[in-house]
Amino acid sequence: MKRLWLFFAQSVTVLLALYFIVATLQPSWLQRNNAIRSNAGIALIEAPQSEANRASVATSSFSPAAKKASPAVVSINTSTSVRHPRANDPWFQFFFGDQGVQNQAGLGSGVIVSPDGYVLTNNHVVEGADDIEVTLTDGRKAKGSIIGTDPETDLAILKISLDKLPVIVLGNSESAEVGDQVLAIGNPFGVGQTVTSGIISALGRSELGINTFENFIQTDAAINPGNSGGALVDVNGNLVGINTAIYSRSGGSMGIGFAIPVALAKNVLDSIVRDGKVTRGWIGVEPNDLTPELAETFGVKADTGVIITGVLQSGPAANAGIRPGDVITQIGDIQVHHVQSLLTAVAALVPGTAADVQLRRGDQSLTLPVTPGTRPVNNRAMPQGRR
């Protein structure tokens, strides 16, 4: 019995020693291999919800993710013909001569999201372009045509005509968490396709003054001029965002970059491909964040919500009975806490279909049915800081 017990103890000791050696030198051997399989739809490829954005506990290399996603990330070169605004002025021509038409070049990135040749990018990358050239990582080039744009989210959809296109797998940005590792892929400064790594620093960033509708993923993965429209992917190589802007005092990366979540980008893509445009709800109000001063000015008893300081005459809100001084607290099933959340909630309404709006008027609580119209397109100038 003593000999048997000694043999058992020695065996356990050897096995534990082997385990610790492997865990120290080759931890990846002990990880479970979760293979991602594309869930192909009609035109898009989406990762299974349970695997779309979950990283392994320990990752020794991002090479598999980069190899998977990089072929679907393209470089976009644009050319715009520009004529001096005073080119027809005789005095200007006398002093400076005929300036003629000059071409301005632009640079950005994009992501192939469909075998049909649809490419997601930023609106500011292609806005006003006379000629668009899309270059794949395998060296192929194609002329890009604009299918549609959405300036209010700074997204645009291009179409290219090439065979056997690499297509990125769409991840699930709604399951992303702060601290998740991500890769930014694009063509910064035109040096060629570049992959940088970092983490998700924050979610739901808004009120930055970049777009009308903001719900950004913030990351510290290096994003520089030329990265606009490129891919932000998880460690499985699935798309979680479209890189759009950076906060920078120098023009280069300072560790604060912003990406449009793929969930929002997919909704814009579907709307543009299906209808040629993005249709949003609109009720015709001028909202402001509720402050004690505004509450006192309008005599309203509320400490949360968005106060309405102006109502468009004969607009949907006016027709429903909403007045200046009302504080909107909920639209449909969505709670309203600030102006950005009100804009998002109203935009999600279906034009022509009534929705209940809950509000405070003085010390009363009211629910009014509002039938939204279609939001006019707002073509704003591009704010600084966008890359």
Image: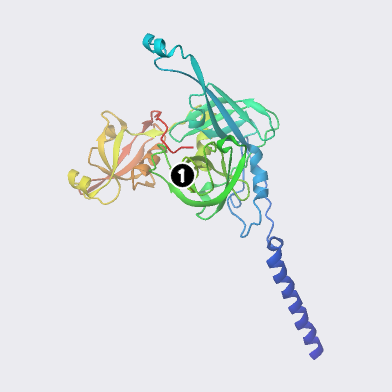
337 up-or-down from 142: above or below: below
Image quadrant assignment for residue 298:
top left
* Nearer to me, 116 or 158: 158
Q: Examine the rendering and report whether any part of residue 240 can be seen.
A: yes
* Nearer to me, 134 or 118: 134
Residue 216 pos. (x, y %): 46, 44
How many other residues sit within 10 Å of disc 1, few (<14), some (14-19) or many (≥20)? many
Tally the marks: 1
347 up-or-down from 93: above or below: below
Q: What amino acid is at disc 1?
A: Phe
* Nearer to me, 72 or 282: 72
Residue most toward the front?
Answer: 95
Residue 280 pos. (x, y %): 42, 33
Q: Is residue 122 left or right of residue 205?
A: right
Residue most toward the right?
Answer: 3
Which residue is painted at 63% across and 59% down in the image? 58
Which residue is painted at 72% across and 75% down in the image? 16
Residue 193 pos. (x, y %): 62, 39
Q: In this view, does 356 lie to the left or right of 10?
A: left
Quadrant for the N terminus, please: bottom right
Q: Examine the rendering and report whether any part of residue 38 can be seen.
A: no
Residue 245 pos. (x, y %): 47, 40
Residue most toward the bottom?
Answer: 2
Q: Is residue 312 left or right of residue 142?
A: left
- What residue did someone put label 1 on? 216
